Amino acid sequence: MDKAVILNKLESLRRCVLRVEDKTPPSLAGLVSDADLQDIIVLNLERAVQTSVDIALHVISHLDVTPAETMRGSFETLRDAGYIDASTCTRMTKAVGFRNVAVHAYQEIDWEIVYMMITKNMNDFRMFAQQMNALVD
């Protein structure tokens, strides 16, 4: 596995998470009323999920396992191979679900769910990053 690839992607993930946290308004109303803020946050959440999937797929490509058929499956494969724990797997597969809604049905985004995610679940990406960082140390 290419350490530089993983480290570069982990840095991209870190930037996305920080951007979301920097732009998170103090209330749900602040998010609901600001379309530009919605775009910034959703774009960076999508990027964070996609970057996490890219990391997972890079690791999987160097394992002697059947490749995952879905984005969610990439985290399940990492869990099954012992590279991430079950809790991280569950949280990352939920993040993929959010990403799929954001990409394919933007008008149907529930801003309450987004607000909960950005105020309570950003550490999910950090936990994933820590576990991936452990692979390259």
Image (cartoon, rainbow, N blue to C red):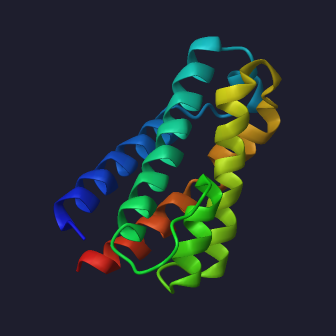
Location of residue 42 by image quarter = top right
Residue 3 left/right relative to 41: left
Q: Residue at x 35, y 43 (%)?
A: 15
Q: In the image, is 88 to the left or to the right of 15?
A: right
Pick the front one: 64 or 134: 64
| Image coords of residue 46 (percent x, y) | 55, 37
Q: Residue at x 56, y 30 (%)?
A: 41
Q: How many marks?
A: 0
Looking at the image, the residue that sits furthest to the left is: 4
> In which quadrant of the rendered view does residue 136 lie?
bottom left
Q: Compared with residue 82, is residue 6 higher up or lower down, i.e. above or below?
A: above
Q: Is residue 52 above or below residue 112?
A: below
Give me the residue at 49% from left, 67% from top.
128
Residue at (49, 45) in percent of width and height: 50
Q: Quadrant of the C terminus?
A: bottom left
Closer to the camera in the image, 116 or 85: 85
Quadrant of residue 94 within the rendered picture: bottom right
Question: Residue 133: horizontal and vertical position, in percent?
Answer: 32, 72
**Where is the N terminus found, in terms of image quarters?**
bottom left
Give the vertical position of 66 relative to 22 (above or below). below
20 w.r.t. 68: above or below: above
Near-viewer residue (102 or 57):
57
Report whether 108 appears left or right of 7.
right
Percent coordinates x, y for residue 16 in the rendering: 42, 41
